Image (tube, rainbow, N blue to C red):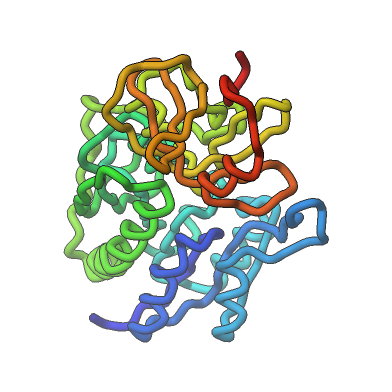
Amino acid sequence: MEPMRLIFAGTPEVALPALSALIDAGHDIALVLSQPDAKGKRGSGLHPSPVKTFALDHGLAVETPVKASAPDVVERIRALHADAAGVVAYGQILRPPLIAATTHGWVNLHFSLLPAWRGAAPVQRALQAGDDLTGATTFLIDQGLDTGPVIGQLTETIRPADTAGDLLGRLALAGAPLLMDSLDALVNGTARPQEQIDDGVSHAAKLTRDDALVRWDLPAHVVDRMIRACTPAPGAWTTLPDGVSAKVGPVAPVDGPSTTPGLVKEIDGDILVGTGGAPVKLSWIQPAGKKAIDAREWWRGARWSDGAQLGEA
């Protein structure tokens, strides 16, 4: 593989394996684009993105424009004469002038088997939907949302206990060489991008706090999927009997008769919560303003009376 002169665009930690692989392979990363520094939790100042921090630690030039497709940014990138650009979870829509600012185009690594789950939260929505199989796709960015022609794909089995964090971690590692190979094929002329088919299109909107509110009246398997899809972010949550909100960790459906949705019981050392079907075993809970705690420790320390329920009655 001949060294390439590249732009890299990415923001969260999930983009780091791809950037690291490109650096380790000896490619010339002319510029890294990342989202502007963001406020930390509880407004504790501005913090650089994981990609910006990683890039600076490796001596790379970094820019964090509010609008990457602004004319001045486009001109600076065009002046770098990059062969191509790799994109992983950058977080901005790229406009045609920016796409045209490299010789061969911009290749995005997306964590689904396109055309399934186009959009911001493909892994989370696949888990929520109960998919058995997902993967990663590299494609040439065009004017649509994840609609460009596909260069390469890989598949990944969704495991029964996977959280979004688990699955994203595996896909990020597996997708790094896929992005590098796709960029190489594009630059050396061996890539044969294929237009996406019209069948099987689905959309993956970002999960909101409202999406993450646990509906204990739904069947156990639906509650399980939803919580895993929201772990670690935005974080599944419920309300405690005193009205305080609390994040909840992954649950495990268990055999047993149905009970009142949200009703909490300790049975044989396990903390079980009722759903619209069989109960589920709670792993951990984090009341607002406190640290996460094992469900058994929380239940025994909280001393709720019999009949205590999570969620709104």
Spot occupied by residue 19 in the image (x, y as percentages of width and height): 44, 71
Q: In this view, does 208 lie above or below 86?
A: above
In the picture, the quarter occupied by the C terminus is top right
Spot occupied by residue 74 in the image (x, y as percentages of width and height): 60, 59
Spot occupied by residue 289 in the image (x, y as percentages of width and height): 74, 47
In the picture, the quarter occupied by the N terminus is bottom left
Determine the residue positioned at 48% across, 29% down.
265
Spot occupied by residue 163 in the image (x, y as percentages of width and height): 39, 47
Left or right: residue 100 versus residue 192 is right
Left or right: residue 226 versus residue 75 is left
Looking at the picture, tell me which residue is in the foreground, 213 or 297.
297
Determine the residue positioned at 52% across, 45% down.
295
Query: Hey, which quadrant is residue 20 in on the image?
Result: bottom left
Determine the residue positioned at 58% across, 43% down.
300
Looking at the picture, tell me which residue is in the foreground, 255 or 229.
255
Looking at the picture, tell me which residue is in the foreground, 117 or 8.
117
Q: Is residue 191 above or below residue 254?
A: below
- Tell me, yes or no, if residue 117 can be seen here: yes
Looking at the picture, tell me which residue is in the foreground, 124 or 77.
124
Q: Is residue 262 above or below residue 232?
A: above
Determine the residue positioned at 33% across, 22% down.
278
